[in-house]
Image: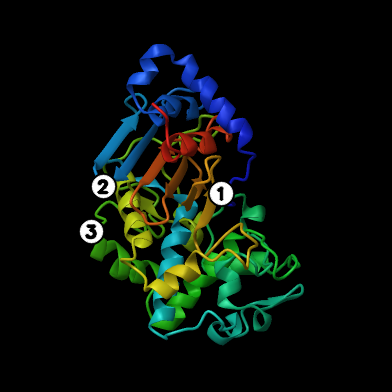
Amino acid sequence: MPPLRTLLAVPVSLAALALASFGSQATAKPPTDALLPLLVPGGKGRAAALLVREESGARYTRTGRAISRTDRFRAGSITKTFVATVVLQLAAEHRLSLADTVEQHLPGLVRGAGNDGRALTLRSLLTHTSGLYDFTQDTEGAVPVTALQAVRIALTHPPADRGRFSYSNTNYVLLGLVVQRATGHSYATETERRIIAPLGLTGTSFPGSRTSLPSPHGRAYAADGTDVTDLDPRVAGAAGELVTTLADLDRFYAALLGGELLPPRRLREMLDTRAARGSYGMGLFPEKLPCGTTVWGHNGRIAGSYVRTAATVDGRRVLTFRVNTTAIADPRLEPALLAAEFCPRTP
């Protein structure tokens, strides 16, 4: 799913109004904690939670009892940061090059309707500048498909302008196939070996086709209130399959931006947004807040779950929040919450 791009002046005003509405009691707790309840759409069982990780410790907040700190949940497109990290690790090991064409790794696969894998590089997949059609526009994120089926759906459509940023889940499905071709193992196996196990992310997994969430977990709701806790993760595959926890996401982004997972050169490449003209790096995107601070991270939306992680560029402060439904109540609240957390506050 594409990163939210909203004007920040409105959310900042909204944040101020939201905090004021909480009255004098709100001054006793961080502004993010006061904003959190506003993220939750109306409806029975809807809830939100956030976990902030910083050098002094962790801060956890939730709304209601429908969410717990240790819950497993679906992280949607945050999966892309994990997959991009694996690809960049393989590049650092000289097992592939970002300048390689898709054709070199997946010969004959990307052809049709004006699409041509011989003209597309792995870098263009990572930065969403390939022009490939997003297969989920046809499946609406509700139809389980294999990776090859997802690619074939995309290839029935002509590409967008190659070289311009156009967010497409198809890019990361293809990267999952590239990882398998380069290593002989699935992207899930490589991610578990390279990231999940070394960092001790005990609540993080790739469920494959398993429709149930591992315990403990709460319930997940579609926008219309339907319970969608059970879901076939093949609706997203390498573009959004991941199941994880708040603490694991905070740990992962802290480690990634802190230099634990990539050599300095590859981390700089990951944060380089020039190819996407400032919109996206490789599995990460920046958001500049009104105070001038830029945070890095990703969001994830899949049926029954919306998640957002943002961190300082050094990984020393990380915030992850989630709601147990497909979208937050008002998307303008997201940049407001980030500003409340990462912008300096005057006494």
Disc 2 from disc 3: Cα separation: 18 Å
Q: Residues within 10 Å of mark 1 (few under 14, many from 20)?
A: some
Are dots 2 and 3 in contact, CB under 8 Å?
Answer: no
Report the disc number at residue 190. none
For marks 3 and 1, give the CA distance. 31 Å
> For mark 2, does the 10 Å Cα neighbourhood hold few (<14), some (14 to 19), or many (20 or more) residues?
few
Answer with mark 2 or mark 1, whichever residue precedes in sequence: 2
Determine crowd level at label 3: few under 14, some 14-19, many 20+ residues with C-alpha closer than 10 A: few
Residue type at numbered disc 1:
Ala
Q: Residue at x 43, y 68 (%)?
A: 267
Q: Residue at x 38, y 43 (%)?
A: 319
* Residue contact at pointers 2 and 1, CB within 8 angstroms: no
| Residue type indicated by callout 2 | Glu
Q: Which mark is residue 55?
A: 2
Q: Going from the N terminus, do you reach mark 2 or mark 3 first?
A: 2
Q: Dividing the image into 4 quarters, which one contains the C terminus?
A: top left
Mark 3 touches mark 1? (CB < 8 Å): no
User: In front of the other: label 3 or label 1?
Assistant: 3
The reply to whether residue 130 is in sight is yes
Q: Which residue in the protein does label 3 denote?
A: 200
Amino acid identity at mark 3: Gly
The residue labelled by disc 1 is 142
Instruction: Answer left or right for 293 relative to 70.
Output: right
Looking at the image, is 284 positioned above or below residue 319? below
